[in-house]
């Protein structure tokens, strides 16, 4: 038995560490936030799952070059960065060109639980831990939203 999964890009933390840990542009943060919230909405409402460990290491970027599409009939493979974008990122500058078109994927559901059945009371990475978990109260999908808000604030600053 084996699992075959799509090839994904770097996680948000690695992406920032590669470039000296600058804050991301506001438009990129908005795009990341929108996609994370869409993913969590699906997990929470459709799958009835609480991720319980939203953090930059569990958010993966899938970047594809869109400006140079190949004619139909030829095989195309997504590249991480084209030449212009690679030069701008070599200098340590993250700009809207280098993060122009990407998809965000939520990864690592290893510590997730059902909305209606929890497996552990101490969840989340300490820096992103929600108030209800800190107080030992019942938690729900809102715990993931708290973690996202902490993460987005950190990524923007």
Image: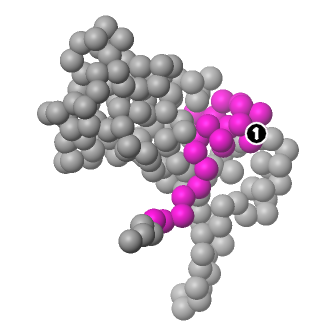
Which residue lies at the image location 61% right of the left edge and 37% below the top edge?
13
Mark 1, Cα crowd under 10 Å, few <14 / some 14-19 / many 20+, is some
Picture quarter containing residue 144? top left
Side (left or right) of 152 relative to 81: left
Quarter of the figure that contains the N terminus: bottom left
Nearer to the camera, 6 or 82: 6
Which residue lies at the image location 50% right of the left edge and 19% below the top edge?
127
Residue 44 showing in the rendered view: no
Quarter of the figure that contains the C terminus: top right
Q: How many marks?
A: 1
Side (left or right) of 116 relative to 90: left
Side (left or right) of 35 relative to 66: left
Residue 149 position in % (x across, y down):
43, 25
Q: Is 15 inside the magenta-drawn segment?
A: yes
Picture quarter containing residue 70? bottom right
Which residue lies at the image location 73% right of the left edge and 63% below the top edge?
82
Give the dominant element type of the magenta stretch: helix, strand or loop.
loop
Q: Which residues are magenta?
A: 5-27
Determine which residue is flagged by label 1: 19
């Amino acid at each position: 038995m084996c699992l075959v999964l799509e090839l994904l890009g770097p996680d948000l933390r690695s992406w920032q560490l590669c470039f000296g840990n600058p804050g991301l542009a506001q438009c990129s943060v908005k795009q990341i936030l929108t996609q994370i919230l869409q993913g969590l909405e699906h997990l929470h409402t459709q799958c009835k799952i609480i991720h319980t460990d939203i953090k930059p290491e569990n958010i993966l970027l899938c970047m594809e070059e869109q400006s140079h599409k190949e004619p139909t009939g030829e095989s195309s493979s997504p590249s991480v960065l084209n030449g212009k974008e690679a030069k701008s990122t070599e200098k340590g500058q993250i700009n809207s060109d280098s993060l122009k078109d990407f998809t965000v994927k939520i990864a690592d559901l290893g510590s997730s639980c059902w909305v209606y059945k929890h497996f552990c009371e101490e969840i989340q990475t300490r820096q992103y831990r929600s108030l209800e978990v800190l107080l030992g109260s019942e938690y729900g999908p809102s715990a993931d939203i708290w973690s996202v808000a902490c993460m987005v604030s950190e990524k923007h600053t």
